[in-house]
Amino acid sequence: MITLHINGAIQVFYHRLNVAELIQYLALGGKKLAIERNGELVPRSQYAECQVVDGDRLEIVMAVGGG
Amino acid sequence: MNSLSIAGKIYSSRLLVGTGKYKDFAETKAAIEASGAEIVTVAIRRTNIGQSANEPNILEAIPPSRFTILPNTAGCYSADDAVRTLRLARELLDGHDLVKLEVLGDPQTLYPNMPETLKAAEQLVKEGFKVMVYCSDDPILAKQLEEIGCVAVMPLASLIGSGMGILNPWNLQIIIANAKVPVFVDAGVGTASDAAIAMELGCDGVLMNTAIAAAKDPVLMASAMRKAVEAGREAFLAGRMPKKLYSASPSSPTEGVIAASKKSTA
């Protein structure tokens, strides 16, 4: 069992997964977003190889209106 | 009207606009069209997880293929948060590296935290970002940001969202006189005349959001701002007449005025 902090909320998973799989699971596939794992940017090219592990803190962001 | 160059790219509009506080994306889009702006700011925020399936995205309304998107660090109160936000933004925008740095001091005034701003600017320049930086109107700090390598300095006219206009034109003039990079007034513009004054002082451009978005008719105000920035720029280039307290100088000829109608009784 792995517990992830995604955008400040806790989510529990029962299998190993990488960032690419996480994005699919969260129904965010194909969206313009960027991801940070434990304070470090995860480049898009590394989504498939980047395994998330228990306790990871993920920030998934998008562009919104702002001044 | 000579064009504006930022980090080697030429722009014909000197009005930069934000995309916050609009009713919906349709209004955002209409206002930005009316403003004629080519550089448009966006913020970076957490994605809604689990409830965003078909939510429209600002980048669909304002496509990066047509506009220069300027991601900002609004809401960041430390250099570290600002740098992380812009790394995410660069990834999000496929390597686009022109960014707006702002590190805020407190949520009441949104006044810039200058020590943290300088720290973040230094780090971002080191990482290859082209940094347009929101700053206080302190001429020394503005110069330091330029020396760090920022591509534009953007002193506030007055507090973000206040609509108070230009509170210290004298400091702005010192910043403009000493700068080798473009200077933009960012924040505090309330109405068209404020934008025109900024341009008449010699600013290279004006960045605004609330003045347009919070107007009763944002699209009409966007059009007004476009004209104000153009008018102010032309007036600056034309060079205004000197101010004179006395020494009246009539606009019409003093010769050939018709004679008084009544015969002199003398």
Image (cartoon, rainbow, N blue to C red):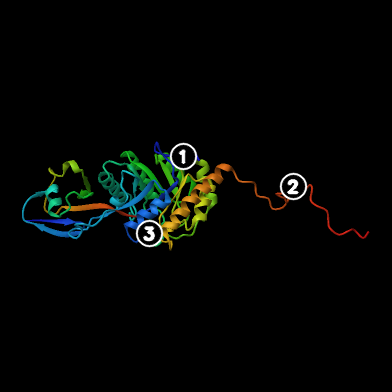
- CA–CA distance between discs 2 and 3? 59 Å
Residue that mark 3 sits on: B106
Residue plotted at (43% across, 54% down): B222
Residue that mark 1 sits on: B3
Of the two numbered discs 2 and 3 in the rendering, the one whose residue sits closer to the viewer: 2
Nearer-the-camera pick, A37 or A29: A29
Expressed as whole percent of the image width and height from the top left, the position of residue B233 reads 52, 45
Q: Are marks 2 and 1 on the same chain?
A: yes
Nearer-the-camera pick, B253 or B64: B253
Quadrant location of the N terminus of chain A in the rendered image: bottom left
Residue that mark 2 sits on: B253
Residue plotted at (46% across, 44% down): B183
The answer to which of marks 2 and 3 sits earlier in the sequence is 3
Nearer-the-camera pick, B179 or A32: A32
Instruction: Decide: few, some or many residues near mark 1? Use Cα within 10 Å; few <14, some 14-19, many ≥20.
Output: few
Q: Are marks 1 and 3 on the same chain?
A: yes
- CA–CA distance between discs 1 and 3? 36 Å
Amino acid type, callout 1: Ser
- CA–CA distance between discs 2 and 1? 38 Å
The answer to which of marks 1 and 3 sits earlier in the sequence is 1
Using the rendered view, name the quadrant where residue B93 is placed: top left
Residue plotted at (44% across, 60% down): B162
Task: Report in which chain the residue with disc 2 lies.
Answer: B
Using the rendered view, name the quadrant where residue B76 is placed: bottom left
